[in-house]
């Protein structure tokens, strides 16, 4: 598009971010409720535009999984508006003052939550992200620039029209939310150079996209390359719980980044657990197994696991299995192959669970629970804008608070430094 300029869009977003930062909670919630209403009211036109993306996607040969993520029907529209209303119900973190303490000289020192400024999101498929990311950024007082994939361009622009319609109707700078209309790779290149106006980049999609953004950005990037999530079955595990959690974490939604990719089994209980696991995985979804030499005999049609299998993010009904000699070997394996996403231990020994939590530093560590709970909504954030597996400035699922930072505030009564 010849009349589109990414530098101008970023500059306008920077100015609009100052407006967004000054909105109070009531004003932000009013906007979000109106956006939810507008998306529902325009559902027919959004679905019509979405149909264009579906037709184009089929013509391009998109996978069925990608097409499933792309579809917006009447229920999908209602889900989007419901997600926005859930964000309305969340506590606004902006302006909160924490850790207020009195210094010996009488000044009070605290830290106040403030917006980050301008956030750029680069993502694939999933047009619901357009609305939900915009809602999270508005609620946290940020401006946002959204660059969705070409496969969802008609859907994204239709949703953007609803967002801008509401902002204009409420006399709020519409540049608080910007949706890039140009899907060319050169636009991403230009976007990643706007370090003077954009404060943070959040990529959501495949490992290739995230690596490209990380390697080419002049702006700080929230990284989440992949989710190699481990399940460790301890010798003190309740085997019924272990089987249920394995099946849920692997088969409920295998394409999710919080699905199990490797299961480690303590050697002392492997002869009891592995037959149960093999039967359950076969019954649930005929999961393909890559097994070590000590476990391969328990699985029909299993392949011998290689070193690469323990690095793999299958995103499918597929899993790697390894028998370990003990707790320490399980810890060492996880620390070697982790992607810092989610790790789970199954054990009835409280001290083992506590030690696992201490020694594993992935962004989410669980005891006796499915990895599928590693999700912003399930963890009580209400909604998430992404997942960070880099430790600065956020780690794990990112909700409203992760879209803010802190500034020091000082309250005095005429004190001067001596």
Image (cartoon, rainbow, N blue to C red):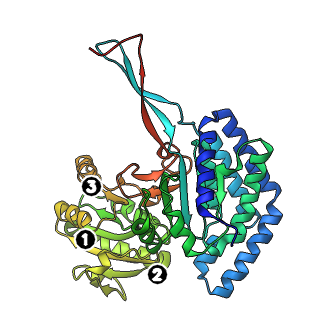
Q: Secondary structure at mark 2?
A: loop
Q: Residue at x 29, y 58 (%)?
A: 237
Residue 207: name its quadrant.
Answer: bottom left
* Rendered image: mark on residue 360: 3
Is residue 290 depicted above or below 240 in this figure? Answer: below
Residue 79 showing in the rendered view: yes
Q: CA distance from mark 1 to mark 2?
A: 20 Å
Mark 1 vs mark 2: which is more N-terminal? 1
Q: Give coordinates of residue 366: x percent, y percent.
A: 36, 53
Instruction: Give 397 or 134, whichever is nearer the viewer.
Output: 134
The answer to whether marks 3 and 2 mark residues whose Cβ atoms lie closer than 8 Å is no
Horizontal and vertical percent position of residue 180:
64, 64
Q: Quadrant of the N terminus?
A: bottom right
Which residue bears the numbered disc 2? 286
Neighbor class of circle 2 (other Cα within 10 Å; few <14, some 14-19, many 20+) is some
Label 1 belongs to which residue? 270
Proximity of marks 3 and 1: CB atoms separated by less than 8 Å: no
In the image, residue 187 lies at what x, y percent?
A: 57, 69
Q: Is residue 314 left or right of residue 156?
A: left
Which quadrant would the C terminus be assigned to in this image? top left
Q: For the point 43% across and 34% down, which residue is it?
A: 407
């Amino acid at each position: 598009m010849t009349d589109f300029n990414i530098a101008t869009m970023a500059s306008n977003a920077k100015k609009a971010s100052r407006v967004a930062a000054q909105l109070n909670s009531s004003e932000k919630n009013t906007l979000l409720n109106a956006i939810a209403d507008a998306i529902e009211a325009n559902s027919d036109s959004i679905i019509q535009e979405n149909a264009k993306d579906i037709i184009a996607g089929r013509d391009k040969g998109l996978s069925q999984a990608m097409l499933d993520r792309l579809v917006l029907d009447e229920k999908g529209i209602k889900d989007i508006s419901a997600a926005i209303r859930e964000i309305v119900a969340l506590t606004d973190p902006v302006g909160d003052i924490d850790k207020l303490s009195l210094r010996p000289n009488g000044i009070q020192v605290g830290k106040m939550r403030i917006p980050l400024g301008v956030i750029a999101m680069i993502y694939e498929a999933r047009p619901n992200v357009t609305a939900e990311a915009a809602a999270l950024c508005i609620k946290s007082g940020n401006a946002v620039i959204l660059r969705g994939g070409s496969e969802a361009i008609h859907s994204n622009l239709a949703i953007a029209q609803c967002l801008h319609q509401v902002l204009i109707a409420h006399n709020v700078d519409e540049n608080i939310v910007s949706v890039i209309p140009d899907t060319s790779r050169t636009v991403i290149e230009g976007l990643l150079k706007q370090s003077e106006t954009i404060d943070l980049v959040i990529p959501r999609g495949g490992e290739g996209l995230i690596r490209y953004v990380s390697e080419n950005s002049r702006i700080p990037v929230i990284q989440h390359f992949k989710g190699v999530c481990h399940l460790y079955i301890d010798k003190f595990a309740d085997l019924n719980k272990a089987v249920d959690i394995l099946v849920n974490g692997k088969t409920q939604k295998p394409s999710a980044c919080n699905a199990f990719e490797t299961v480690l089994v303590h050697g002392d209980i492997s002869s009891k657990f592995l037959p149960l696991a093999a039967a359950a995985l076969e019954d649930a979804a005929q999961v393909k197994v890559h097994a070590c030499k000590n476990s391969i005999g328990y699985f029909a049609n299993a392949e011998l696991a290689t070193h690469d299998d323990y690095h793999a993010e299958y995103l499918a009904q597929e899993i790697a299995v390894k028998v370990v000699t003990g707790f320490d070997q399980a810890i060492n394996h996880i620390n070697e192959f982790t992607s810092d996403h989610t790790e789970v231990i199954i054990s009835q020994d409280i001290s083992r669970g506590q030690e696992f939590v201490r020694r594993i530093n992935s962004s989410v560590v669980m005891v006796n629970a499915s990895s599928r709970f590693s999700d912003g909504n399930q963890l009580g954030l209400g909604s998430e804008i992404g997942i960070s597996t880099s430790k600065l400035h956020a780690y794990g699922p990112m909700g409203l608070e992760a879209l803010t930072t802190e500034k020091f505030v000082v309250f005095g009564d005429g004190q001067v430094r001596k």
